[in-house]
Amino acid sequence: QGIAPRGYDDLNNNFKQLLLLMSKNDDILRDWLTWKTTWTSVSIQAEIIVFIACTIQHDIAQKMFGLMADETADVSRIEQMVITFRSVDDDLEVYEDLGLHLLDCCNSETIYKTLKDILIRLNIPLSNCKAFCADGAATFQGAVMGVITRFQEDELRIAQAHCHMHSVNLAMSNAISNEPLTRNFLLLVQDIDFLCDSPKRCALVQKAETEKTASENKMKAQAGGYAKALENFEFYFCLNLSIHIFQISDRLSKVLQEKELMLTFKKSIVESEKVDVTPPKLPQMVQASNEPHRFESPQAFYRAKYFSIFDSTNGALQQRISDKATAVLLAVEDVLVAGWKGEMQENKKIDLICNFYGRNIDRDHLCHQLKSLENINDQNTMKRSISELVSILRDQLVLRKMLPVVVNLICLYLISPATTTIAEHSFSTLQQIKTYLRSTMSQPRLNSLITLNVYQETLDKLDMTALVNKFIKNGDEK
């Protein structure tokens, strides 16, 4: 839960106080706490935390895995790099194990050597790494000295991936800022937010309403300009448009349809009348040597702007997300679903997969086993996606043994991370656990506490009785 087990002294720490609270309803525990023992000492607490965290983590020494890395600074101003291993077990269940490592420097050379050192210490061969996902910083994605590029020089079969969520954010930012209409809208929103975010500035605005000095008159005029802009239809149109775009970008599974686009524009017209804003108007035309295009009505002008912004957003998304690794993963999806439906396979996609994964995928065996997928029938599925196929294979051990190359291809697909979400999650957890009151926490303890906090669902499923017995057997002194 991110709560510190320690306190100012041994008696008043949270761990001891929790035991005393539980002992009120447990006579055996109350009697045991009266004994002189080291079981509740700080050293034993630390050992138990590390022991449980190691139990949650999975052994990936001999498995294919995907690698994710990101970096941040903790409350002590120490650079922490989050390393996540994404692996698949024999039942096609995906697991992600993370850990933090201190960084002396944030350049690509230091990060590259740190990651290689971690793999050596864990006895994990680099040849088992099949994918590497990181943000778009040049430190990781640089074409010459980037960390992923240097890993690919050591192992050619590593798929390079730019975190899709970072790509979406960058695409949204580029698409919105390239259009003057939405760019001016966001600048206005930032100015208003800057004004309202400070109690001091809000107080000055309220003071300007009663006093009439030169500075207050200037501020009052500026506030009046903001009020007039808020009453403009252009502001309300951009507000509805931005909400619609950002909702779609957050869901990422919605497809822009023509009917939905038109309904949103009509909604802006109808709701703008309810809040008493100015009706839509055509912008003033600037004299130019060439005759510009003239819109017949304000509706035609804003409709063109609407579709222009969505077209630029769609183009920015395709440019940011489309890469070689994405093309391979899409080919894997198409090949598996086509084989499941009994459709004709495209040799071009099979060649792309086999050339990319090399010795991990045998082409002849893959083609034969893809034909066998057609015989897998399930009344509850429509044979539309690879997730449905994976769910069937998870419950069928015999099928997995009969189709080893197909299962291997699915594993390569599943270990390819699309985002660094688990790393971003660990950043917020880091802020909760390592606070300014706990800034001297050791790195092993920090790693263990973050692991327990992130994987709470897995922790709740552990058999604590078996864990305690195993912990006792680890040392005779216990």
Image: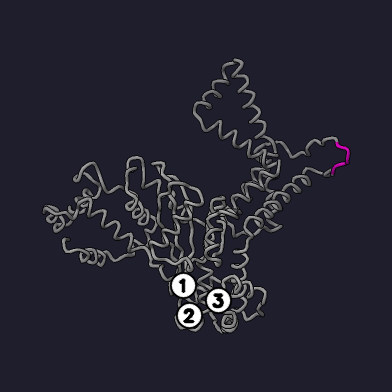
Three-letter residue code for mark 1: Leu
> Do callouts 1 and 2 mark residues in contact (Cβ within 8 Å)?
yes
Based on the picture, tell me whether residue 372 belongs to the magenta stretch: no
Q: Position of residue 119 (x, y in %)?
A: 42, 62
Specify the segment rendered in magenta.
Answer: 288-292
Q: Kindly report which numbered mark, 3 or 2, lies closer to the viewer in this rendering.
A: 3
Q: Earlier in the sequence, mark 3 or mark 2?
A: 3
Question: 377 or 184, which lies in front?
Answer: 184
Q: Residue at x 60, y 72 (%)?
A: 353
The residue to which callout 1 is attached is 92
Q: Residue at x 54, y 69 (%)?
A: 413
Q: Position of residue 228 (x, y in %)?
A: 67, 31
Q: CA distance from mark 3 to mark 1?
A: 17 Å
The residue to which callout 3 is attached is 361
Residue 245 - label: none
Q: Is residue 203 above or below residue 392?
A: above
Q: Residues within 10 Å of mark 1 (few under 14, many from 20)?
A: some
Three-letter residue code for mark 3: Ile
Residue 278 in view of the camera: yes
Q: How is the image coloured?
A: one colour
Q: Is residue 389 left or right of residue 453?
A: right
The residue to which callout 2 is attached is 400
